[in-house]
């Protein structure tokens, strides 16, 4: 084989290798682009819910009330969309929540009442398995409240969770090295005992938040409440809640639809999160629930 032919053969092989390498790079780029698009596209999609047929908006409010569990801004946005949609005739809030953040629960309650005040559309709150504490607070924003006979309803109270490991730490030889400024900054430090002054201060905070909760429920439920016993933190079945005035009727969303909405078409307004969003929400929610804060 002469030098010219050998050179041509080598050049040909090199060109083939270059083409093959280029093809692999392009293929990988396309694959990565498609993969990332599948993951992140749902984050950029808007949930406009511009339905063109007359319907009742069904908004699911499920889970612990936290900024990432029952998402405050998302819930308010969905109610706003239902109010703004001319094809939406009424709204059902389907609630399944044991409560959670005192602040987030009140924000949702206040904002739904604000939206409701400027619309003729009715909001029907339907408690599924649980509508307790902050979950009931949200339910109270509806024009009427319903629950199943075996639903858990009530628990109108406030709690502040903390713990003390001072004696255990001493036995194990563990010493706290927290550095702080301000004489009361370590009021909830688990390595220090709670002084009587600190306990009194915390109790006043919890009592004040509880009073705000009670005042809002009294305004929402009016004279139908039969007794102040409902404000002790106890909870009841749907049947008992009806007797106490916490709910208006025992029934499901289907009963509400048949009796009050003339079997309206129910359209779920919640956008279903993808796997990554669910995973992120779960991680952040678990972290939030482990943090100290006032909860219903």
Image (cartoon, rainbow, N blue to C red):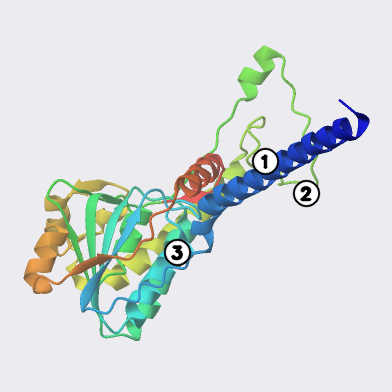
Q: Say left or right for 268 vs 4.
A: left
Percent from the top left, x then y, of residue 16?
74, 38
Percent from the top left, x then y, of residue 245?
17, 62
Percent from the top left, x then y, of residue 270?
36, 61
Res. 248 mark: none
Work out whether residue 159 or residue 3 is closer to the camera in this orientation and state it.
3
Which corner quadrant of the image does residue 268 belong to? bottom left
Task: Check disc 2 and report its element: helix, strand or loop.
Answer: loop
Dot 2, how many residues are within 10 Å of its Cα: few (below 14), some (14-19), or many (20+)?
Answer: few
- Residue 204 visible in the displayed image: no
Residue that numbered label 1 is attached to: 24
Quadrant where the N terminus sits is top right
Q: Nearer the viewer, mark 2 or mark 3?
A: 3
Q: Is residue 133 above or below residue 194?
A: below
1 and 3 marks in contact (CB < 8 Å): no
Q: Which of marks 2 and 1 is in front?
A: 1
Q: Say left or right for 100 vs 136.
A: right
Q: Say left or right for 27 vs 119.
A: right
> Marks 2 and 1, Cα distance to the nearest angstrom?
62 Å
Residue found at x 62% / y 40%: 188
Percent from the top left, x then y, of residue 92?
24, 67
Residue sitting at the far front: 2
Q: Which of marks 1 and 3 is in front?
A: 1
- Residue 44 visible in the displayed image: yes
> Marks 1 and 3, Cα distance to the nearest angstrom?
42 Å
Task: Check disc 3 and report its element: helix, strand or loop.
Answer: helix
Residue that numbered label 2 is attached to: 182
Q: Is residue 262 above or below residue 18?
A: below
Residue found at x 21% / y 79%: 54
Residue that numbered label 3 is attached to: 74
């Amino acid at each position: 084989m002469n030098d010219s032919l050998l050179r041509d053969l080598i050049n040909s092989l090199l060109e083939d290798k270059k083409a093959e390498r280029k093809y692999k790079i392009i293929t990988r780029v396309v694959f990565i682009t498609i993969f990332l698009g599948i993951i992140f596209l749902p984050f950029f999609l808007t949930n406009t819910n511009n339905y063109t047929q007359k319907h009742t908006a069904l908004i699911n409010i499920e889970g612990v009330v936290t900024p990432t569990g029952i998402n405050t801004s998302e819930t308010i946005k969905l109610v706003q969309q239902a109010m703004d949609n001319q094809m939406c005739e009424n709204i059902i809030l389907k609630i399944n929540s044991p409560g959670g953040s005192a602040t987030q629960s009140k924000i949702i309650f206040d904002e739904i009442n604000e939206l409701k005040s400027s619309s003729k559309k009715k909001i029907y709150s339907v408690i599924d398995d649980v509508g307790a504490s902050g979950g009931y607070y949200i339910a109270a924003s509806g024009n009427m409240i319903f629950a199943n006979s075996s639903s858990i309803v009530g628990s109108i109270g406030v709690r502040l969770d903390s713990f003390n490991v001072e004696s255990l730490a001493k036995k194990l030889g563990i010493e706290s090295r927290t550095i702080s400024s301000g004489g009361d900054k370590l009021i909830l430090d688990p390595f220090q005992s709670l002084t009587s002054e600190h306990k009194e201060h915390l109790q006043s905070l919890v009592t004040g938040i509880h009073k705000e909760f009670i005042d809002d429920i009294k305004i929402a439920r009016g004279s139908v409440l039969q007794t102040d016993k409902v404000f002790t933190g106890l909870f009841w079945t749907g049947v008992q809640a009806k007797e106490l005035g916490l709910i208006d009727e025992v029934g499901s969303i289907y009963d509400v639809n048949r009796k009050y909405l003339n079997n309206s078409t129910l359209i779920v307004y919640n956008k279903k999160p993808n796997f990554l969003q669910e995973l992120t929400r779960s991680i952040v929610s678990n972290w939030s629930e482990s943090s100290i804060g006032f909860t219903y």
